[in-house]
Amino acid sequence: MFAKNILQAKDAALRECQSHFAVPDAIAQHNTLKILEAMRKVKVSDIHFNTSSGYAYDDIGRQKLDELYAAVFHTEAALVRTQFVSGTHTLATVLIGILRPGDELVAAMGTPYDTMRTVIGYEKKVPGSLIDFGVSYKQANLTADGHVDYNSLKNCITAKTKLVLIQRSRGYSSRPTLTVEEIGKICKFIKKIKKDCICFVDNCYGEFIEAQEPTEAGADIMAGSLIKNPGGGLAPTGGYVAGRKDLVELAACRLTAPGMGGELGASLANNRLLFQGFFLAPHVVAQAVKSAIFAASFFGKLGYSVHPAFTDKRGDIVQQIDLGSSEKLEAFCRGIQKYSPVDSFAVPEPWDMPGYANQVIMAAGTFIQGASIELSADGPMRAPFAVYMQGALTFEHGMFAAMGAAQEIEDMSK
Ligand SMILES: *Cc1c(COP(=O)(O)O)cnc(C)c1O
């Protein structure tokens, strides 16, 4: 049962958000049409939904899925594979596939996502990391308000710079997420300094948030996770790479072996899940964005500081809420877990997660392990005791889980 003040805050938040829901709804319409047109163009049919075995030469489902992603993302080629174990693996495959000893990698947006720091290997010695292979690394600073520092970026780019990594989502940093327009500007800026420099976008959490993707705005190649936005909640695992044909081929040869590239690799999972998930993705992403907008308004009404605000333009599906105490952060995660479809009886507790400075608490009652297009919440146990909430396959679930989290905080003080 929800308390009266929570029901009132919900009603007020719903009224306040209505006109802001129109933005993700309109983008979902645009992107659904884009996918339908691409599906017609490449002629998707149910013969593409089978599994395959062994080497899987001439797997027409796998080939068609690559074709579909390339058509939607307006690229020469794509590589969509359940053999990618995670987003990090997919991004690392692109970097290790393209970069050679003596090349230089530059990160455009300050410190990259936690796991990417390990892949690059610049904080400590990591066997098999890019630095271990003789690739050098530099990162551009951000401006004080978290935007691209063009001067710093310019100073990083030298004759040795082969590739610039542009991370679209903020990850768990507090900078704003990049818009596709800004990514286009950054790519143009880089090409002006060094024409053959490769612009590579970490597109995790960004797919279908806007009407265009980075590869339509000037990026040479991008990559992401299938258990985030483009999997639409149905893809069981995997990642995708989309971009220039020669670069996608280099990534494919790293994933499998030189000379083999994307021509081998069995479709062990039913391909229908990947096609149908991609078809659903624009709608599902809009559900997640609307849940985030609702949470921003709702928790704002309950007196919490939220980022972004419900009125802000969004670049990803993540909502930050500053809860102010460890007790509230724990209660919030308990509430989210209670209102999850899977493992709703579990009680999340803070734990020492490998690679993190503080203990972290996580709530995730998802059908697919760790899928963050499904509703989840997590936060480090340190001031301002911020919780990061993301995903939701349906708006209704996102809304009730937010109310459940608020109720759990309420019950705590009784
Ligand atoms: C999720 C994410 C990744 C990859 O994370 P995995 O958990 O390995 O899928 C990389 N970069 C960003 C910005 C992300 O949000």
Image (cartoon, rainbow, N blue to C red):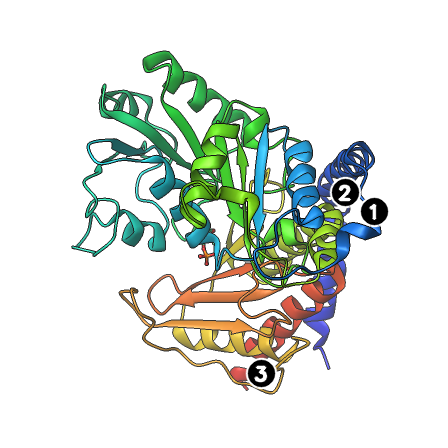
Q: Is mark 2 within 8 Å of ligand 1?
A: no
Circle 3: residue type: Asp
Q: Are marks 1 and 3 in contact (CB under 8 Å)?
A: no
- Which residue: 68% across, 32% down? 71
Nearer-N-terminus badge (1/3): 1
Density class for disc 2 (Cα within 10 Å; few <14, some 14-19, many ≥20) is some
Circle 2: residue type: Asp
Of discs 1 and 3, which sits in the foreground?
1
Of discs 3 and 2, which sits in the foreground?
2
The disc label shown at residue 25, or none: 2
User: Residue 152 at x, y = what percent?
Assistant: 26, 25
Nearer-N-terminus badge (1/2): 2
Density class for disc 1 (Cα within 10 Å; few <14, some 14-19, many ≥20) is few
Location of mark 3 (residue): 411
User: Residue 64 at x, y = what percent?
Assistant: 70, 42
Q: Are marks 3 and 2 in contact (CB under 8 Å)?
A: no
Location of mark 1 (residue): 45
